[in-house]
Amino acid sequence: MKKYILPESELPNTWYNITADLPQPPPPPLHPGTREPIGPDDLAPLFPMALIEQEVSQAPEVKIPEAILDVYKIWRPSPLIRATFLEKALKTPARIYYKYEGVSPAGSHKPNTAVAQAYYNKEAGVKRLATETGAGQWGSSLALAGQYFGLDVKVYMVRVSYDQKPYRRSMMQAWGAQVVPSPSEDTQFGRQVLAEDPTSRGSLGIAISEAVEDAAGRDDTKYSLGSVLNHVLLHQSVIGLETQKQMVLAGESPDIIIGCVGGGSNFAGLAFPFLRDKINGKTIDFRAVEPSACPTLTRGQYSYDFGDTASLTPLVAMHTLGHNFMPPGIHAGGLRYHGMAPLLSHVVQLGLVDALAYNQVEVFQAATLFASTEGIIPAPESAHAIKGAIAAAEEAREAGEEKVILFNLSGHGHFDMAAYDAWFKGELKDIELPESELTKNLKTLEGLPVF
Ligand SMILES: Cc1ncc(COP(=O)(O)O)c(C=O)c1O
């Protein structure tokens, strides 16, 4: 069979929370002022209580409300596809499967949590959401979700993406959102950054600071984050829960599970339900793939750090390049974040998940091989997972092993054609983060709590 489709009746009606199964708990988030563990009240200005409860929940399963399932059903369950043509091109004995999240209206996995966050905010009487976006995938997903539940959405879009991806901006506008480039004149922090550097390309860290400042300053507004947080990873688990059923349909059990990582949500969404099996004794190799230009897991420090540049967020224990990190303008805009989901960082620390980094030239080579064999033009972010899968399939070929490789194709690249254009013109260059810059950035962690 080429693809494995579940009927709507098989759509999972609970999300999976890995916290319940971890051999030891991750370090708690700390208040940025007191540096004591935060409580629900500390998060209340930014998030509705239902999401805060999910953030700290120890329950293994959380029920998905009917209203969210009704929206999920527009594109879920998403297909699991066997990459038979890619396998043939690679002459590998491995069997490669990919879960395709590009079928959502916004073209990626991000609506899985956007819809849930919009729903809980609406239920709590919130009128407006403020958020940031890097590549524009998250901003468009929240704009879409805002439409389903009648919420206004304001998006602070990292300047470099705002300029590179005008159609993502139009998409957000089509779904009724207000979009401004970040740093913007609309917040105190944005004005401060612009005063220091009027040509700032922006970063996710800066855009998060702007969105948090916006939400904290208005009674009708809450903040929404597209990755990193526990409740986001929880919502994304629907990906892995569906895939587990589809792998049974395929009569397979994955040996290697791969995803790209920016903040960690699509990787965790696919991987965590399977990681439960690994914690319970099964042998599965997990590989989180990031860009060499923003090597959070492979070269960052596991430390307490802020989630944003202005140091407004709680201090969280994660792999980080330092909250002032200004990533180079590589074409995988969604993978340019200085930190990583605390839950993913924790399982990497525990040795349950491995991390790999690839440069953008080899990633675009993988993307074009995939497009020319399987047909789908991947998002540059997702192409990192494809590169990881191709490398695993080549290892299997060298070893003569029939491995089963599963990866997450987190989105399509239809709004990333400017990046492909640069690639075809030979303009894309490999960018390694120099050691001196890394060391300089990590200095911003000095004085922060350690474990
Ligand atoms: C298609 C796609 N994949 C992956 C990512 C990275 O985010 P995460 O690591 O949270 O899945 C993004 C972020 O914008 C994205 O748009």
Image: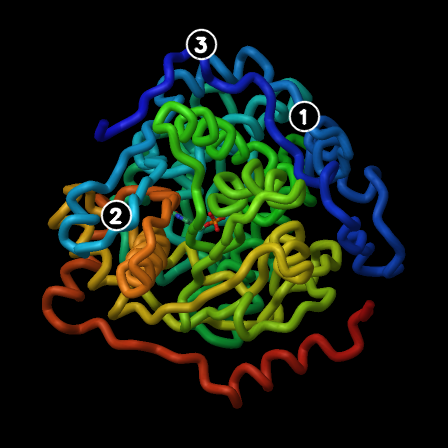
| Quarter of the image where one finds residue 384 | bottom left
Q: Is residue 103 left or right of residue 234?
A: left
Scheme of colours in the image: rainbow
Q: CA distance from mark 3 to mark 2?
A: 29 Å
Query: In terms of sequence position, does the residue under pointer 1 or pointer 3 come before the other?
Result: 3
Which residue is identified by label 2?
378
Which residue is identified by label 1?
61
> Which mark is in front, 3 or 2?
3
- Rendered image: mark on residue 9: 3
- Residue 154 vs 352, above or below: the answer is above
Q: Is residue 317 left or right of residue 191?
A: right
The amino acid type of the residue labelled 1 equals: Glu
> Which mark is in front, 2 or 1?
1
Query: In terms of sequence position, does the residue under pointer 2 or pointer 1 come before the other?
Result: 1
What residue is rendered at 47% in x and 17% in y?
11
Asked if the residue at label 2 sits under 8 Å from ligand 1, the reply is: no
